[in-house]
Image (spheres, rainbow, N blue to C red):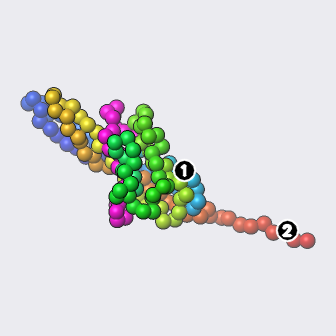
């Protein structure tokens, strides 16, 4: 939790920014693995940024101007990721990952940039990760084969 104070009109306001963490398991080849992320409030998102800090470039998906921006996207995620709901209804900015491989194992961070109106000015707020998701991709354990013997 990050605790921030701001002074406004001689009053102090306290803002809690809570980051959520989720562990998800998947198997290689699985389609449409959902990595959850929700907006912290009802303000519309200007930019949604999904990253994997251990990769270079770190962008898994950058969504702005109501569309994906593939320019700086890590090549391994091209044509394999999308927002679960492009309209971001009800604050859902979850990531859908298809054709999962073991190389997808890692920690994913979801950041959201929202616009805030302050009097006559509008400013864009940056965000610490609001969700972190650890994705573990491994073959199922305990598999065995049946053989017919005659």
The x and y percentages for residue 24 are 50, 53
Which residue appears at 33% of the width and 35% of the height?
44
To which residue does mark 1 refer?
32
Of 70 and 141, nearer the camera is 70
Which residue appears at 66% of the width and 64% of the height?
142
Of 90 and 140, nearer the camera is 90
- Residue 9 is a magenta residue: no
To which residue does mark 2 refer?
148
Which residue appears at 16% of the width and 32% of the height?
121
Please tell me whether residue 117 is drawn above or below residue 16 in the rendered image: above
Magenta residues span 38-58
The x and y percentages for residue 145 are 74, 67
Which element type, helix, strand or loop, lies under badge 2? loop
Horizontal side, residue 56 vs residue 141: left or right: left
The x and y percentages for residue 122 are 19, 34
Classified by dominant secondary structure, the portion drawn in magenta counts as loop
Where residue 118 sits, quadrant-wise, is top left
Horizontal side, residue 147 vs residue 109: left or right: right
Horizontal side, residue 94 vs residue 57: left or right: right
């Amino acid at each position: 939790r990050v605790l921030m104070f701001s002074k406004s009109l001689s009053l102090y306001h306290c803002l809690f920014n809570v980051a959520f963490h989720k562990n998800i398991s998947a198997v290689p080849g699985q389609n449409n693995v959902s990595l959850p992320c929700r907006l912290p409030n009802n303000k519309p998102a200007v930019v949604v940024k999904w990253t994997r800090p251990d990769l270079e470039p770190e962008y898994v998906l950058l969504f702005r101007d109501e569309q994906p921006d593939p320019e700086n996207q890590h090549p391994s995620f091209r044509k394999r990721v999308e927002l679960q709901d492009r309209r971001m209804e009800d604050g859902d900015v979850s990531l859908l990952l298809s054709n999962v491989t073991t190389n997808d194992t890692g920690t994913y961070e979801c950041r959201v940039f929202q616009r805030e109106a302050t009097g006559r000015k509008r400013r864009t707020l940056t965000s610490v990760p609001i969700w972190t998701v650890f994705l573990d991709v491994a073959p199922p354990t305990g598999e065995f084969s049946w053989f017919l013997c005659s």
